Image: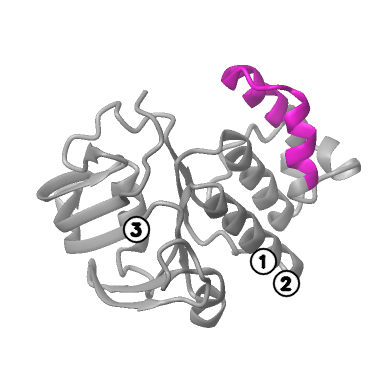
Amino acid sequence: MPGRLEGVEAVDVVQVVALDGGFPVLAGVDFSAPRGSVTAVLGSNGAGKTSLLRTLAGLTSVASGTGQVLGVSVARPERGLVGRVGLLGHDTGCYEDLSPAANLRFLSRILRADPRRADAVLARVGLTGRLGTTAMAELSAGQRRRGALAQLVLRAPELWLLDEPHASLDGDGRALVDSVMEDAASQGMTVVFTSHDPAGAARVADQVCTMAGGVVTDRQDGDRRGPHAA
C-alpha cells in the first residue's frame, strides 16, 4: 500500500462527470482538498454532495474528467483506495445485533490492531459503560451515529468522507464530531463532510464549498486555521 501523502493535495479533481445508472450525478465538478485539512460541502438535497463523496471513495463511475484521490486516478480507482478511504454515510455499517464495543473488537481483529484501542475509541466518542455494551439496534439514532464514528476513528484512514455526520445529534454530539474531525486533520488525515448548516460548518472547516446541479458553485475559507491557512 502506498504511504501517506505529504505536501500534496489529498484530493484534486477537475471537470469530473460521474454517472449513476446512466444519469450524470456530477456535471463537471472541480474540487480539491489539501492533506490535513477539513472541507465542508454545502448544498440542498440533490445538489450532488453525496455523489461527490461516493465518487471520491471510488464507488461511482467517472465518465470524464481528470484528477486524483490520494495519488490514485479518479477515473481508475480500482483497488488503489481500499483501506485508505473511510466513507461514513447514513447507514452505520455496524452489526446491529452487536454492541458498539463488540463491533469495535471485531474490527480490531480484522485490522490486527491492539484490542485495547477499542476502549479508548469508545471513550473518545462517549460510548462508555452501558452504552458501549448495548446492542446497536437498541441505541438512539444519535448514539448509533457515535458507534459508526467510532469505527472510523479506529480505522484512521487517510481520507475521511462523512455524509451529514451531525444528523440526529444534539449540541454536545455535534461538538464531539467537530472535535474528532479536527483531531483527524491535526494528525495529517484529510476530512470532507457534507452539511446543511453553513454557520456550523464554517466553524470547523478550513474551506467551505457549495454545490448545486452537480458542480461546485462557490468556495470560501472557513474559520478553522488549518495547515494551508495563511
Circle 1 residue: 174
Magenta stretch in the rendered image: 103-123
Residue 99 seen in render: no
The relative height of residue 151 versus residue 185 in the rendered view (above or below) is: above
- Does 22 sit left or right of 182 as displayed? left
* Residue at the image position 66 percent from the left and 42 percent from the top: 150
Q: Which mark lies nearer to you, 2 or 3? A: 3
Relative image position of residue 148 (x, y in whole percent): 62, 44
Label 3 SS: strand
Q: Name the residue under label 3.
A: 33
Front in this rendered view, residue 10 or 166: 10
Name the residue at 30% across, 52% down: 9
Looking at the picture, does residue 69 appear above or below residue 198?
Answer: above
Q: What residue type is labelled 1?
A: Arg
- Neighbours of disc 1 within 10 Å: few (<14), some (14-19), many (20+): some
Q: Assess whether residue 187 is covered by the magenta stretch.
A: no
Residue 76 lies, with reference to residue 47, above or below; the image says above
